[in-house]
Amino acid sequence: MSPCPAPGRCRRAAEWSWAIGASLSLAPENTLSSIRQAARAGATWVEIDVDVLGDGTPIVIHDSSLDRTTNRSGPYDHLSQADLHGIDAGSWFIAEDGSRPYSGEPLPTLGQVLEMVAAEGLSVNVEMKPCEAGARVCAELVDAVARHLDQFAATAPGSQAVASSFNPLLLDRLGRRRPATRLALLMAAGMPTGAWRSYAEMLGVEAINPADEGLERALVEEIRALGYGVNVWTINSPQRAEELFSWGVSGIFTDRIHEFGHLVTEM
């Protein structure tokens, strides 16, 4: 990998080999039950999305509002941890037989999820959401993630953790706040690909995590040639996963980990 312009921020990429994800056809996303189901399906890594409440409590949720995955509506940046009581993050999920087996599933905090990740012997990719509530809240999100990763490292020494984000400012703050953190830069479909190297070198990331849509083999080979991991999201076809691994990608994210048994390997 080329030298980084920021002293102390450059790190050589580890060789990642993983199928990381959950079984979202079996349990609602970003819940304790989804972690449990992923472990039962043979996952060694899981990916979770993290944002923060108004009181600084980090919660595990994908969207910036409660509408899609809970029984409540609206943003949560004005809520406190006490407000989580009664929020149902599972009743929206309908099983194949038409039942709602996860009704009453709580909206979990980051601490609760990391406790379960540790208990299941898993490793974790913590995605910090872009954080739409302003600079102060973004700083609280990063600081909360740093504290919880410290606790996770102390209580689960056999597990690994990576932090990722689409927002390079969050990665930069986390890298300064907690220099030991392994970082990955997320790339959305349609994002300009020419800037990835500058971001990667300045942030000290060890992996680029691009969207599958529009991804070309030449970009994968370019990133890998410079020593970075490439972990592609979201891959729900084993055949596509095999193709990507033949390109040299180091990992994939999937929502259907139970269908990827032969590709789930230790990092």
Image (tube, rainbow, N blue to C red):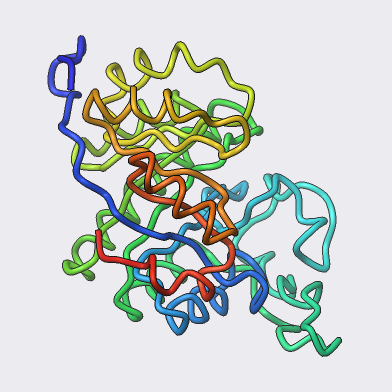
Please state, as top left, top right, bottom left or bottom right, where the N terminus lies in the image: top left
Percent across and percent down for residue 163 are 37, 45
Q: Residue at horizontal 56%, vertical 74%?
A: 34
Please give left or right for residue 225 compared with residue 55 in the image. Answer: left
Q: Which quarter of the picture shows residue 222?
A: top left
Please give left or right for residue 112 compared with residue 97 in the image. Answer: left
Percent across and percent down for residue 44 are 34, 70
Please give left or right for residue 241 compared with residue 86 in the image. Answer: left
60 to 127, vertically: above or below: below
Q: Residue at horizontal 58%, vertical 34%?
A: 130
Percent across and percent down for residue 38 are 48, 75
Q: Residue at horizontal 36%, vertical 42%?
A: 249
Q: Residue at horizontal 56%, vertical 39%?
A: 212
43 to 10, vertically: above or below: below
Q: Nearer the viewer, residue 140 or 93?
A: 93
Q: Which quarter of the picture shows residue 30?
A: bottom right
29 to 3, vertically: above or below: below
Please state, as top left, top right, bottom left or bottom right, where the C terminus lies in the image: bottom left
